[in-house]
Image: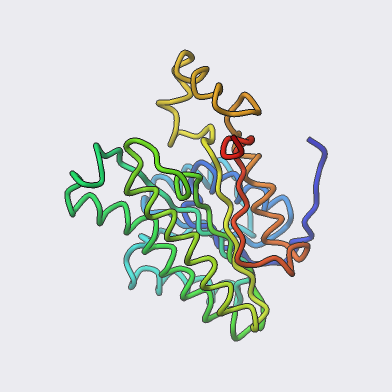
Amino acid sequence: MAEISYNLEGKVALVTGGSRGIGLEVAKYLLKENAKVVICARKAEGLEAAVKELGKNENLLPIQAHIAKEEQVEQLFKQVSESFSKLDILINNVGMNLLTASVAETELLLWQKIIDSNLNGTFLCSRMAARVMKEQGSGKIVNISSIAGSRAAPGMGVYGIAKAGIEMMTKVLASELAPMNIQVNTVAPGMVRTNFSKPFWSNDELYQEICKGIPAKRIADPIDIVHPTLFLASEAAGFITGQTLVVDGGQTAI
């Protein structure tokens, strides 16, 4: 793929769940754009591994934080402010799923864990980012959702409900924040080749079966999600807000 520039030099970006998968890949390309990048993750060892992969960089700041905990989110944004004095871009990437037999049979504690990580964490981070961006008079919030938010799938019910909530939150925040020149959008991937989905794509027979339902005949690589995300985080998307950009190789088109 040819080199693409999004003119993000000097921008300050926070990537939640930035220690692995899509978040790590987004952080990598933000650094290539000479942006100042904060990655946060719940586990210190994950952050250490990410820093090792990304390389020592004065523009990179790792912060340990659990985004479903309000006090830790407040501390996270305080550290970002103290280090860089502004926040131009928030990438809400944290997501987790634990397969459930059905929503009707899901225990409350499991429901809460999935909703906390996906929906509540996105809310808490977006709320803090909005406060900072309002004072600046500009900003970009990009949420990473999933096609599970718009179509029911076995074992993915609670996860899908959480992602659907993120897509509605995107619309609400976009309408509220547009007068302050803050754009809020969502990228909704299909299956992506990360450790999160490895049980599906590592089995060749299962992978071929999955690909039968995707017109592109493959699942996404992380880079396929990076470029739409950075586009929505750039000034090129300055008049796009409240939208969900589906990146699924045509899977939801059929």
Which residue is at a point 74% across and 54% down the rendered structure image? 33
Q: Residue furthest bottom?
A: 135
Q: Is residue 253 above or below residue 91?
A: above
Q: Is residue 180 above or below residue 51?
A: below
Which residue is at a point 54% across and 36% down the rendered structure image? 192
Q: Is residue 181 left or right of residue 22?
A: right
Can you say which quadrant of the picture contains the C terminus? Answer: top right
Q: Is residue 88 left or right of residue 122?
A: right
Q: Position of residue 125 (x, y in %)?
A: 45, 68
Q: Work out whether residue 185 or residue 14 is closer to the camera in this orientation and state it.
A: 185
Q: Position of residue 123 (x, y in %)?
A: 42, 68
Q: Position of residue 77 (x, y in %)?
A: 47, 72
Q: Position of residue 34 (x, y in %)?
A: 73, 57
Q: Is residue 106 left or right of residue 116?
A: left
Q: Is residue 138 left or right of residue 107?
A: right
Q: Residue furthest front?
A: 254
Question: How many numbered discs?
Answer: 0
Q: Work out whether residue 121 or residue 244 is closer to the camera in this orientation and state it.
A: 244
Can you say which quadrant of the picture contains the N terminus? Answer: top right
Which residue is at a point 55% across and 23% down the rendered structure image? 211
State the colouring used for the structure image.
Answer: rainbow
